[in-house]
Image (cartoon, helix red, strand yellow):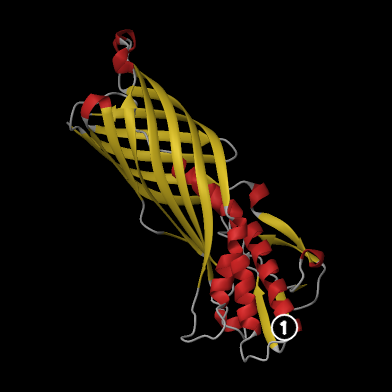
């Protein structure tokens, strides 16, 4: 907050003919933009945690030293209706006024979150003679969100495996998604001979993942001011702890797990900033957006079925909690 005050004082002293009214209007613009961002992008950052949580483990079974497993995964996230939209009213806003798609003034509107549809309204306001207006950002406009990722694991010493996960950037309507991470799995049933004899496998897993989501926000072409907030990025760091148990039935392995994770969620505006811009609009917005940084803890259940065809495995996994996420994988074991 002190840094924002300093920057605003800096702005007020620029030879930009900044009046007290213009400075106050910019402060209201800041508040409205961050209020809208919070409601708009939070569902996607929550969903990204679920997407990254599922499908880490192919099996809790102990593998031989230097055994390698490679997998290709297709992930499907089911978008809940409650997280697809939110209501916004003129009374919620201090800078912007709300208009419909034909620029007729309205008192309230139901607008999409990042997980919502493509319906748009208009928001408009002024800082002195400079107009700031934009269409409300669109969502992914889909009931399911798909992305693919690769997994790899190598068995090291004492029943431990190093696991890696990586996805290329997935293009979504109005946004992008990417995740990568690493983890360590340790086999537990190796300490209980009676369990291994019954083909019951147990393991614990600790892993880290980084999720990066981005969506368009206020394009520069719409405004008299180059605010540099064309895009909003969600940066999520997640630490996950997981316990799994499975039972083998000939070619089948049935698995269940409990997942707990903790995520630090940060946001950042990205956009075009003119060289030598006198007023650091983007820097001010990125300082203000720190107010909606979050830390969240989630608890999930996971069930999975794996089928063996020689050295190829087919695996279907479902994770459930606040959201439902599914994962289908094709794996190959080198041993």
Q: From the viewer's side, name the closer residue of 77 and 97.
A: 97
The answer, for residue 144, to whether it is visible in the render is no
The answer, for residue 45, to whether it is visible in the render is yes
- Compared with residue 88, is residue 75 higher up or lower down, i.e. above or below? above
Name which quarter of the figure residue 59 lies in.
Answer: top left
The percent coordinates of residue 45 (x first, y second) are: 54, 52
Q: Give the quadrant of the N terminus.
A: bottom right
**What residue is at 80 percent from the left and 67 percent from the top?**
90
321 left or right of 242 in image: right
196 left or right of 220 in image: left
Q: Give the quadrant of the C terminus.
A: top left
Residue tagged by mark 1?
22
The percent coordinates of residue 268 (x first, y second) are: 52, 64
**What residue is at 79 percent from the left and 77 percent from the top?**
104
251 left or right of 255 in image: left
Count the marks: how many?
1
Q: From the viewer's side, name the closer residue of 129 and 116.
A: 129
- Compared with residue 171, is residue 143 higher up or lower down, i.e. above or below? above
* Neighbour tally class for label 1: few under 14, some 14-19, many 20 plus, Cα within 10 Å: some
The percent coordinates of residue 178 (x first, y second) are: 42, 55
Name which quarter of the figure residue 193 lies in.
Answer: top left
- Compared with residue 1, is residue 310 higher up or lower down, i.e. above or below? above
The percent coordinates of residue 125 (x first, y second) are: 73, 79
**What residue is at 19 percent from the left and 32 percent from the top?**
67
Q: Residue furthest top?
A: 194
- Compared with residue 96, is residue 224 higher up or lower down, i.e. above or below? below
Q: Secondary structure at mark 1?
A: helix
């Amino acid at each position: 907050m002190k840094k924002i005050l300093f920057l605003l004082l800096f702005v007020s002293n620029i030879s930009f003919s900044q009046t007290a009214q213009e400075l106050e209007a910019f402060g209201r613009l800041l508040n409205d933009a961050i209020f809208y961002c919070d409601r708009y992008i939070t569902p996607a950052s929550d969903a990204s945690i679920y997407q990254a949580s599922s499908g880490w483990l192919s099996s809790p079974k102990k593998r031989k030293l230097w055994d390698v497993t490679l997998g290709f995964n297709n992930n499907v996230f089911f978008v809940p209706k409650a997280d697809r939209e939110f209501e916004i009213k003129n009374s919620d806003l201090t800078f912007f006024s709300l208009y419909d798609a034909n620029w007729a003034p309205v008192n309230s509107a139901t607008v999409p979150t990042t997980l919502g549809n493509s319906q748009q309204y208009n928001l408009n306001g002024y800082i002195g003679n400079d107009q700031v207006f934009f269409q409300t950002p669109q969502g992914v406009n889909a009931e399911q969100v798909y992305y693919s990722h690769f997994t790899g694991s190598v068995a090291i010493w004492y029943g431990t495996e190093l696991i890696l996960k990586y996805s290329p950037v997935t293009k979504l309507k109005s946004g992008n998604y990417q995740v990568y991470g690493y983890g360590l799995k340790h086999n537990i049933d190796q300490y209980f001979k009676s369990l291994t004899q019954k083909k019951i496998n147990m393991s614990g897993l600790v892993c880290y993942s980084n999720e990066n989501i981005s969506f368009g926000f206020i394009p520069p072409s719409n405004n008299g001011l180059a605010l540099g907030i064309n895009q909003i990025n969600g940066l999520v760091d997640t630490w996950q702890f997981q316990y799994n148990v499975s039972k083998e039935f000939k070619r089948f392995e049935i698995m269940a797990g409990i997942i707990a994770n903790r995520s630090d969620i940060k946001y950042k505006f990205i956009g075009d900033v003119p060289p030598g811009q006198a007023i650091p609009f983007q820097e001010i917005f990125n300082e203000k957006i720190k107010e909606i940084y979050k830390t969240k803890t989630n608890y999930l259940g996971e069930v999975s079925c794996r089928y063996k065809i020689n050295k190829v495995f087919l695996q279907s996994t479902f994770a459930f909690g606040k959201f439902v996420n599914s994962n289908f994988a094709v794996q190959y074991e080198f041993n």
